[in-house]
Image (cartoon, grey):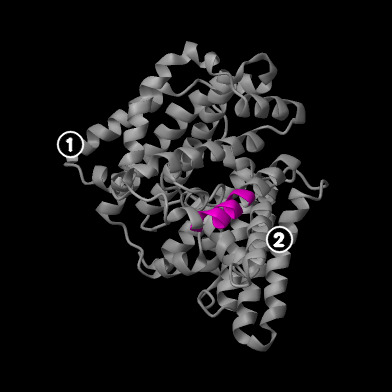
């Protein structure tokens, strides 16, 4: 089948998929697609006016997003609006910067913006990575196996593990004042794990479906809870969003090229906007500012300490310290009620060690955690999905059957939507 027919079929399917779950909000998707497509063409044809068309494309797309996120009139926010808005902005920006030319047809560009595996919750694709693949796409057995493996892993993460964690910790956050410090701390660590497995599970499923169809979408997570500093964490967590913020916000603001003070301000502003992208509430603002502060503190003290704390075994305290502050930040992300947040913060920061005695079995995990941290470089260097997908066929099929059984047996009878669909 010629590629143009495959593209037309995928586009029709993607639009039908989005209309089925978002209804009339498909108009928002069409608006962003036509606007940014037009601006990309005009930037290429009229470079003397490229600033005008850049502003028109970016502000038009962001303006629609802001109406839903911050306007308070239009609600609820259409599914996927935050994700496909940022994806379309990469197209206009890259044409403006001369890194990429306009798509050969609006059909191809519309497929990029609406591609059904990633339109709802990402990852945030870039046009310059996605569109060239339309010319060479083909179904390959190795891609089918890799994609199916990734989908299976994603299903286990979400339905077999994350949803079960959520059922157990939601009552705690509903009434945290009734619990001591041990329960609060364990709940917030459990929430961090739930959030990671839920969102990375969705990303795995989306990337796996795309891969099975012949498209390579870059990974969105790379074991972020083994990061040894805040900067490394953001290189491993929600990679498509953090790299978007770096390339299309932090660097255009001046990045680290205009002195230390400007660098710190750029970091904090970028992370505040990252927080507000998640939601127009004060707790997301604080969460973003908090991570901006962590990144700033890392730049302030990191260079002076880096030469002192080198060596293999220093990785353990660095990872532990980093993750302590990361998980502390999840309190701002999870709780929007001020009284509940204040109580949980006090229990997290000023905990009573004796409260943990009834959970003493948890400490049996300590050797496993410490060994994992110690050998994290070796763990991170292995493509585990590829390794599984290359199993001998009979063993690979056993893996898939096992994954399906785990999901069927362990998934709760009622489970929430993917968490990041709310953003």
Left or right, 101 with reference to 142? right
Q: CA distance from mark 2 to mark 1?
A: 49 Å
Query: In the rendered view, would you say 208 is above or below 266?
Result: above
SS at circle 2: helix
Q: Which mark is residue 394?
A: 1
Left or right, 262 with reference to 201? right
**Residue lying farthest to the front in this orientation:** 308
Q: Earlier in the sequence, mark 2 or mark 1?
A: 2
- Most foreground residue, 125 or 286: 286
Left or right, 300 with reference to 49? left
**Residue lying farthest to the right in this orientation:** 73
Badge 1, how many Cα within 10 Å: few under 14, some, many 20+? few
Percent from the top left, x then y, of residue 371? Answer: 31, 35
Report the residue at 42% width, 62% height from top: 6
**Residue lying farthest to the top in this orientation:** 358
Q: Which mark is residue 338?
A: none
Residue at the disc numbered 2: 62
Percent from the top left, x then y, of residue 15? Answer: 57, 54
**Dominant SS in magenta:** helix
Based on the displayed image, in which of its 4 quarters is residue 55 positioned? Answer: bottom right
Query: Is residue 297 rendered magenta in the image?
Result: yes
Query: In the rendered view, would you say 393 is above or below 104?
Result: above
Badge 2, how many Cα within 10 Å: few under 14, some, many 20+? some
User: Which region is colored magenta?
Assistant: 293-303
- Most foreground residue, 42 or 285: 285
Number of marks in the image?
Answer: 2
Percent from the top left, x then y, of residue 415? Answer: 54, 26
Query: Is residue 341 rendered magenta in the image?
Result: no
Name the quadrant of the C terminus.
top right
Based on the displayed image, in which of its 4 quarters is residue 326 positioned? Answer: top right
């Amino acid at each position: 089948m010629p590629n143009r027919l495959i593209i037309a079929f995928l586009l029709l399917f993607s639009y039908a998929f989005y209309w089925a779950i978002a209804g009339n909000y498909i108009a928002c998707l069409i608006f962003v697609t036509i606007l940014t497509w037009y601006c990309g063409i005009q930037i290429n044809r009229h470079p003397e006016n490229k600033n005008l068309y850049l502003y028109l494309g970016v502000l038009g797309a962001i303006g629609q997003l802001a109406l839903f996120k911050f306007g308070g009139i239009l609600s609820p926010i259409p599914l996927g609006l935050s994700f496909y808005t940022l994806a379309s902005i990469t197209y206009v920006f890259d044409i403006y910067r001369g890194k990429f030319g306009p798509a050969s047809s609006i059909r191809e560009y519309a497929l990029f913006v609406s591609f059904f595996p990633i339109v709802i919750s990402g990852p945030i694709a870039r046009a310059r990575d996605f569109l060239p693949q339309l010319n060479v796409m083909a179904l390959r057995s190795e891609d089918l196996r890799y994609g199916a493996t990734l989908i299976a892993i994603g299903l286990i993460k979400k339905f077999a593990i994350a949803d079960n964690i959520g059922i157990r910790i939601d009552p705690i956050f509903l009434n945290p004042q009734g619990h001591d410090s041990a329960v609060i701390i364990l709940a917030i660590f459990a929430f961090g794990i739930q959030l990671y497995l839920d969102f990375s599970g969705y990303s795995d499923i989306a990337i796996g479906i795309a891969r099975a169809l012949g498209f390579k979408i870059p990974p969105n997570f790379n074991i972020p809870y083994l990061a040894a500093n805040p900067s490394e964490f953001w290189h491993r967590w929600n990679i498509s969003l953090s790299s978007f913020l770096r390339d299309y916000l932090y660097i255009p603001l001046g990045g680290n090229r205009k002195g230390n003070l400007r660098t710190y301000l750029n970091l904090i502003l970028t992370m505040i906007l990252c927080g507000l992208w998640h939601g127009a509430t004060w707790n997301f603002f604080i969460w973003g500012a908090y991570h901006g502060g962590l990144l700033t503190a890392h730049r302030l003290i990191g260079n002076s300490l880096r030469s002192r704390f080198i060596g293999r075994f220093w990785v353990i305290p660095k990872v532990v310290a980093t993750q302590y502050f990361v998980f502390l930040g999840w309190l701002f992300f999870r709780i929007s009620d001020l009284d509940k947040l204040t109580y949980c913060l006090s229990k997290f920061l000023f905990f009573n060690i004796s409260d943990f005695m009834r959970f003493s079995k948890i400490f049996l995990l300590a050797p496993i955690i410490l060994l994992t941290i110690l050998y994290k470089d070796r763990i991170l260097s292995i493509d585990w999905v590829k390794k599984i997908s290359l199993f001998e066929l009979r063993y690979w099929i056993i893996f898939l059957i096992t994954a399906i059984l785990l999901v069927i047996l362990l998934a709760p009878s009622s489970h929430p939507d993917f968490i990041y669909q709310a953003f």
